[in-house]
Amino acid sequence: MKKIFFFIAISAFGVMVNAQQNRIDVVGPLSPQLAAFGQFNIGVTTIDVTSSNAVDVINTPRGGDTEYYDRTLTLEIWYPANLIGQDPGTSYEVTTRNPNMTAVLIGRAVRDAEPLVSEGPYPLVILSHGYPGNRFLMSHTGENLASKGYVVAAIDHKESTYEDQQAITSTLYNRPLDQRFVLNSLAQMSSQSAGLLGSMIDADNTGIIGYSMGGYGLVNNLGGGFSEQSVSGFIAPPNRLLEAHATSNSDYRTNLDLRIKAGFAVAPWGMNAGFWEPQDLAGIRVPTFYLAGDQDSVAGYENGTQGIFDGAVNSDRFLLTFIGAGHNAGAPIPLPEELDNEENTEAAAHYTDQNWDNVEMNNIMDHYVTAWFDLHLKGIIRQSALEGIPTAYQNRLSIQHKSMGE
């Protein structure tokens, strides 16, 4: 077993890059090299995609007939752009963890800018948020990757956002399906020359970043079928609906999408709740980078992300650990200033960590995201960027690497 640990020094980073003005594109002076934005200007657009005749988990009664509905997902899509007489920069009006409050985020993209088709098609990366969350929770990564030659699609998962959070049963059933449906939808759009995304996406080279419940869905789509006990557990969707995603289902593996070439799982939820046994995790064969805080009390660490990492014995994988960080390691944007007050203490905790600055964590995450997807979706090898920890962070991070069979 190969186990590598590197350590780094505490800095005054958080003081220097205070997230005032809600910028999602701050790259601090001590950030790792690959956190810097790339060569491309960025466009952004918003679209809806609808899955017809989808299972309506919320309105399906236990022991009754399955209900169906049209399931619409809103996507925020960032892409390399050709700016004609336009200056970079846009604002995003977003709902926060306090759904009665909105925040205005500031980034580099230009709304509905002309796509840079001549340099494409580009690999696709899908962002899948937690429960609850929304498509802007990892928008720092959306803009950052698009500037490096990716099309990035962030999902608003229906019945799992700040505005429309419903019982977790919908999320448990729909999260793997949503990720695959978005991949199919964007691949179809790109196959048509007309439209904003025409000829822009290389869907055969797709990566997924899943945070928390997004990581739960991602692990399932990478080959980690759910355990038998989870299918009929007390929080399971009605009528054994979860069996569609279970190892015991003979059709489960045939429904996986082989265009998903790599995963990036941030604090994936589910291991600590019995959704995977060792034999389930052994089904993961897609290269995966895991990121977590070792004080994660939501998804767990030793009985959570570390357990998934150890159990995925048939895949090449890394685990980056933020020492002292909790469930919010890496993924969430900095705390919106609209929530930075005593009245919103509980909502603010959705974005913050006791021991780490969010901008610092975002920069570190975006560095490793870049190295990982450049390797698996573009064939660019930067092994030292994956296996090493920047010297600025001694004693604050650790990294482990295991190859297939370990």
Image: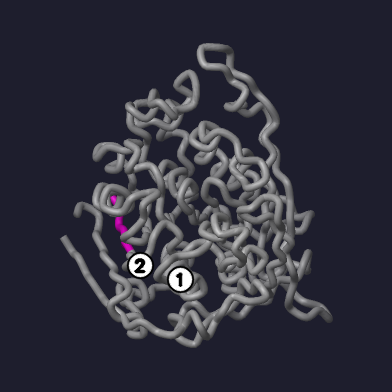
Amino acid at the residue labelled 2: Phe
Image: 396 above or below 60: below
Count all numbered tags in the image, as a single digit: 2
Please tell me whether residue 194 belongs to the stretch shown in magenta: no
Q: CA distance from mark 2 to mark 1?
A: 8 Å
Residue 150 is at least partly visible in this image:
no
Residue toward you, 6 or 245: 6
Secondary structure of residue under mark 1: helix
Q: Is residue 46 above or below residue 224?
A: below
Near mark 2 (Cα within 10 A), the count class, few <14, some 14-19 or many ≥20, is: many
Q: Nearer the viewer, residue 191 or 235?
A: 235
Report the front residue among 220 and 271.
Answer: 271
User: Where residue 259 sits: x, y (%)?
Assistant: 49, 49
Name the amino acid, label 1: Met
Q: Residue 384 placed where, x, y %? A: 32, 78
Across and down, in percent, residue 135 comes to: 62, 54
Give the residue number, with chain letter if any, for mark 2.
322
Going by the image, does 145 lie left or right of 221?
right
Quadrant position of the C terminus in the picture: bottom left
Give the number of the disc on residue 361.
1
Residue 137 appears in which quarter of the rendering?
bottom right
Q: Is residue 349 left or right of residue 280?
A: right
The residue under the point 59% across, 20% down is: 60
- Say if 248 sits above or below 129 in the image: above
Q: Quadrant of the N terminus?
A: bottom left
- Labels 2 and 1 touching (C-beta < 8 A): yes
Q: Position of residue 194 (x, y in %)?
A: 79, 54
Please name the residue shown 42% across and 26% down the image.
243
Residue 82 visible within the image? yes
**Bounds of the magenta span?**
314-319
